[in-house]
Structure formats: structure tokens, C-alpha cells
Image (cartoon, rainbow, N blue to C red):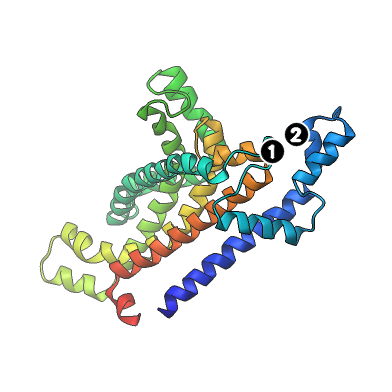
């Protein structure tokens, strides 16, 4: 019960801290949001009315309290005229698309990284190991904002195999998932290789070999399971980075997810939408880390016994 209370308290503090920091940064953004919404030629009376409606002259603490109150009631509305758009309805339409993209990217990363890391660890120093290392270096070095347009040029414009953007058809998911997943797979492949090499030097692996088991069975049944424990921890942290990378990737591919929604809200100076998107990203990040802890405990009986 106590660990659950600690997790819940930590989640609330992280969410409040993220919203607080974003609110400060929004105040520091240069330019008047009234100009962005009404234009510089608007009447002074209209400007004053909109400024009062947006509570721009209220203290930061009062604005945060209004945000928290409306969020708790699920009554938070857009900060731009006509102030009728329900923020959480809009997020509810965009969040499943981002979750779908994150899941597909994770699947790409695991399908590429797991066999690559295992084969490289089984034959250290070989040409295959060198090729896997080169792939990892290349995957980490190439930024997503460059990889996305490159994939569009090759597979959408050059070969005409896949759509350039959007999610009108399932194939529209492929290029964004490859953009996010390939970068993560390169990092994971190196982690799996290093962790598996450490595990194959342990006594229980030597004992398994002494029993006459094949090398493939030794790795699959004895070494790989323990080698994946540190990889799970890193994977949980990298999923947070994956959500952050989704913001840029969705913009490149005009993908209708949370990243595109957040950038549109920043462009429109829709403060409530920006805060709500940041809150949703923070809660998703914390939930992913909680799932990582549960997966770690499921993979290692020693962790379950310590709890």
C-alpha cells in the first residue's frame, strides 16, 4: 500500500511541477498573446475584454488554481475565442493516435534491436558485430528531423510505396513509426549486446554450457532473460524520449496526434490546451515508468521477493 501511495504522490508532484514550469515559460514567451489572437489593429476595448477573459492580468497562482479546478471537473475549455472547445475532448481524439504511433515505433525498435543485439553478442568481433555497431552509431547520430524527410523522399516520393503524410489509411503509420523506431532500435541493440556479453560470462551460463546445452539454448533460456533486465530499465527511460520525439515526427508527417495538437496550441497561444497537453505527456511518462517497474519485477523474481 505504501509504495502505491508514494507512486501516486510522486505522479501528482511531477504533473504539478511540469504544469507550473510550462506556465512560467508561457509568460516568458515574447510578444502579446492578444496581438496573436486579435491582430495588432484590434480596438482597445476588445483587447481589454479578451485580456480579462483570458485572466492574463491575474497572478500566476490564481491562473494555476483555475486550471487545476477546471481540470478536476473535466470542464477545461480552450483559451482562444469562442472559448467553447472542450480541451479534454480534443485530447481524447488525438491521444489514441499518438499511443498507436508510440506502440508501432516500440515494435519496430524491438524487432530490429533484439535479433541484431543477440547476433552481435553471439559473435563478438565478427563482421556481423561490426555491421551492428555501425548501424547503432548511424542510428544514434542521425536526428529524427533529418531521417523523417529522408524516408519521405525515398519511400513516398521516389518509390511511391507509402503515403507522405496523414492517417487516412493504415500505411500512413509506417514512415512515422520507422522514423521513431529506428533511432531507438540502434540504441537498444548496443544495450542488448553489452548486457548479453556480461551475462554470458556468469557462472550459471558456464554451468549451463557444462551440461552440454547448445549455445542457442544457453543464450535463449539462461543468458537473455537476465540480460534484458537492465535493457528494460533503459527502455522505460527511452520511451519518455520517444514521446518527446513524437512532437517533431508528427509535425514532419502531418500526423494527427498529441504532438501536432501541442504545436498548434502553442501557435494559437491556447494556454489551457498547452498546459493540458503537457499534463497528459507527463502522466503518460510516469505511467510508462510504472509499467517498466512492473515488467522488471515480472522478469526478475529477486525484485518480487524484496517487495
Marks 2 and 1 sit apart, C-alpha to C-alpha, by 7 Å
In the image, taking residue 194 as reference, residue 80 lies left or right, namely right
**Label ID, residue 80:** 1
The quadrant in which the N terminus is found is bottom left
CB atoms of marks 2 and 1 within 8 Å: yes
- Category of crowding for the residue at label 1, using alpha-carbon neighbours closer than 10 angstroms: few (below 14), some (14–19), many (at least 20): many
The answer to which quarter of the image holds residue 304 is bottom left
- Category of crowding for the residue at label 2, using alpha-carbon neighbours closer than 10 angstroms: few (below 14), some (14–19), many (at least 20): some
Task: For mark 1, give the secondary structure.
Answer: loop
* 22 vs 87: above or below: below
Outermost residue to the left: 212
* 194 vs 242: above or below: below
In the image, taking residue 13 as reference, residue 226 lies left or right, namely left
* 264 vs 298: above or below: above
Residue 88 point in image, percent of width and height: 53, 46
Residue 154 point in image, percent of width and height: 45, 23
Name which residue lies at 81% across and 34% down. 35
The answer to which quarter of the image holds residue 47 is top right
In the image, taking residue 255 as reference, residue 118 lies left or right, namely left
Give the camera-side residue of 190 and 127.
Answer: 190
Observer able to see residue 142 = no
Observer able to see residue 215 = yes
Tell which circle, 2 or 1, labels the residue nearer the N-terminal end.
Answer: 2
Name which residue lies at 81% across and 29% down. 39
According to the picture, the residue beneath numbered tag 2 turns out to be 37
**Label ID, residue 293:** none
Task: For mark 2, give the secondary structure.
Answer: helix
The quadrant in which the C terminus is found is bottom left
Residue 143 point in image, percent of width and height: 55, 40
Name which residue lies at 43% across and 73% down. 4
Residue 225 point in image, percent of width and height: 27, 64
Amino acid at each position: 500500500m505504501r509504495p502505491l501511495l508514494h507512486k501516486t504522490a510522486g505522479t501528482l508532484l511531477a504533473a504539478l511541477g511540469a504544469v507550473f514550469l510550462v506556465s512560467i515559460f508561457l509568460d516568458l514567451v515574447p510578444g502579446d498573446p492578444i496581438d496573436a489572437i486579435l491582430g495588432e489593429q484590434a480596438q482597445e476595448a476588445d483587447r481589454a475584454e479578451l485580456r480579462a477573459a483570458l485572466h492574463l492580468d491575474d497572478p500566476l497562482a490564481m491562473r494555476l488554481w483555475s486550471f487545476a479546478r477546471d481540470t478536476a471537473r473535466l470542464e477545461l475549455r480552450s483559451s482562444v475565442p469562442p472559448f467553447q472547445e472542450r480541451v479534454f475532448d480534443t485530447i481524447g481524439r488525438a491521444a489514441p493516435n499518438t499511443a498507436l504511433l508510440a506502440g508501432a515505433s516500440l515494435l519496430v525498435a524491438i524487432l530490429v534491436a533484439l535479433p541484431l543485439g543477440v547476433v552481435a553478442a553471439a559473435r563478438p568481433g565478427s563482421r556481423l558485430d561490426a555491421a551492428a555497431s555501425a548501424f547503432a552509431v548511424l542510428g544514434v547520430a542521425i536526428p529524427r528531423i533529418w531521417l523523417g524527410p529522408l524516408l519521405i523522399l525515398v519511400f513516398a516520393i521516389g518509390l511511391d510505396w507509402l503515403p507522405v503524410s496523414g492517417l487516412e489509411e493504415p500505411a500512413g503509420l509506417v514512415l512515422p513509426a520507422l522514423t521513431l523506431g529506428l533511432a531507438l532500435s540502434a540504441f537498444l541493440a548496443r544495450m542488448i549486446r553489452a548486457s548479453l556479453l556480461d551475462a554470458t560470462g556468469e557462472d550459471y551460463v558456464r554451468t549451463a554450457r557444462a551440461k552440454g546445452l547448445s549455445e542457442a539454448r544457453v543464450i535463449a533460456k539462461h543468458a537473455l532473460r537476465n540480460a534484458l533486465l537492465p535493457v528494460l530499465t533503459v527502455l522505460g527511460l527511452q520511451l519518455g524520449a520517444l514521446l518527446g520525439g513524437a512532437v517533431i515526427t508528427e509535425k514532419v508527417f502531418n500526423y494527427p496526434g498529441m504532438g501536432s495538437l501541442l504545436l498548434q496550441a502553442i501557435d494559437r497561444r491556447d494556454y489551457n490546451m498547452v498546459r493540458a497537453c503537457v499534463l497528459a505527456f507527463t502522466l503518460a511518462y510516469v505511467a510508462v515508468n510504472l509499467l517498466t517497474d512492473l515488467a522488471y519485477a515480472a522478469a526478475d523474481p529477486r525484485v518480487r521477493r524484496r517487495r
